[in-house]
Image (cartoon, rainbow, N blue to C red):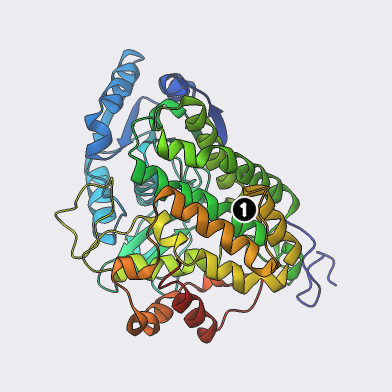
Amino acid sequence: MSASGFSPEHPESVFTYASPALKFGSGARHELAHELGARGCRRVLFVTDAGVRATGEVDALAEQAAAAGIGVVVFDGTRVEPTDTSLSEAVAFARAEGPFDAVAAVGGGSSIDTAKAVNLLLTNDGELMDYVNAPVGQGRAPANALLPLIALPTTTGTGSESTAICVLDVTALRVKTGISHARLRPTLAIVDPELTVSQPAGVTAASGMDVLCHALESYTARPYTSYERKRPSDRVPYCGSNPIADAWSERAMGLLAGAFRQAVRQGDDRAAREQMALAATFAGLGFGNAGVHIPHANAYPIAGMVGPFAPDGYPADPHADHGLVPHGMAVSLTAPAAFRFTFEASPERHVKAARLLDPDAVGDDPRELLPGVVSRLMRDVGVPSGLAELGFGAADVDDLVEGSLRQQRLLATAPREVRAEDLATILTQSVELW
């Protein structure tokens, strides 16, 4: 081993952990102006979508900032499930309206991810595809530091306020991919459960399944010690399951067990909404460091290749050339089969996760325990019963496998080697779940 401690022949012995500063609680959104002022910001870009802006919350926050002497420009053109085109349009708007001292995202994961892309390209040269993960894009790392980014999530799901990842559809390739770099992580997350009360049941169900899969995938990810030792400069945000990420994931699962069904069925239950907001935050703090794997890799081609599917609770997109599958829904649909496949890598973790989500879960075959718990939860909150409900069938499996295999950054985090035939089995088993 060299004097620096690096040797590729030795297993990794170091894991990394990073997170944004966090402010959590009912009414926390009203402290945005204070946080901007404390950072010396005089001109700020707000990134949101038309639906969130229509609630009046964004303009109220802009007025509070103006009262504190801070100028605000609002971009409300975020698209649900952003595309390379929609992100490039947001970047063009921001470059034309700048300069800015900071960026604030108010909305779901789509708005927060759009803000990340805008922040990246306000501070670094080049175009969007230069930074998109290889092999879809060039995988270029940002050379310059980004502006402060403050994220105010309005959905309890994506965890984007905690992560260093921006997700997008590349429309020409009909594939969903991302940009991943530590500099994309928000500076501060302001999580106010009051912003989620108006979230429709369908959105609560889909985004909640994203929380669930974040927690489960990071908890079952390959351990950080299974990687070859890396130089400090080569470490990536996803480092594998580790004791700190595990603690966040376990806590998120416990909160989901008590609150998820109630938040879907009774959206104005403030206690359930607060628990879901905590669960989303905790899961984001976990997977934003450990990583996610097979269900997320499969979700990208599912969302990118879907036909005319319209989910409950989501507005129609007049600019879309295909249907919309919310990210959390796409992730969840192959989760039961994926966890059946990963079981042998860590049986005790899969069983423990099932017990955290459902302490009363029983079954003769421990391999089926977690898939059964996840499937029942999906059914209870109204998620589709399989890929067939989205219009996919056995004839689509090969194309879906090809799309999943492009997500090697995610598949590399799986606790078992994932071959094309393994993905084909998982996707086939997911056509009809019940």
Q: Quadrant of residue 349?
A: bottom right
Q: Amino acid at mark 1?
A: Asn
Residue 144 visible? The answer is no
> Would you name the residue on which mark 1 appears?
289
What quarter of the picture does the N terminus occupy?
Answer: bottom right
- Front-most of 406 and 314? 314
Q: Quadrant of residue 430?
A: bottom left
Q: Is residue 76 above or below residue 362?
A: above
Q: Is residue 252 above or below residue 192?
A: below
Classed neighbour count for the residue bearing mark 1: other residues with Cα under 10 Å, few (<14), some (14–19), many (≥20): many
Q: In the rendering, at what x and y percent does residue 244 appear? A: 72, 47
Number of disc labels: 1
What is the secondary structure assignment of the residue under circle 1? helix
Q: Quadrant of residue 196?
A: top left
Name the residue at 63% across, 49% down. 358
- Front-most of 247 and 261? 261
- Front-most of 1 and 57? 57
What quarter of the picture does the C terminus occupy?
Answer: bottom left
Q: In the rendering, at what x and y percent does residue 239 appear? A: 65, 60
Name the residue at 63% across, 67% down. 368
Q: In the rendering, at what x and y percent does residue 159 appear? A: 49, 45
Q: Is residue 62 above or below residue 236?
A: above
- Front-most of 169 and 363? 363
Q: Residue furthest top?
A: 67
Name the residue at 52% across, 64% down. 335
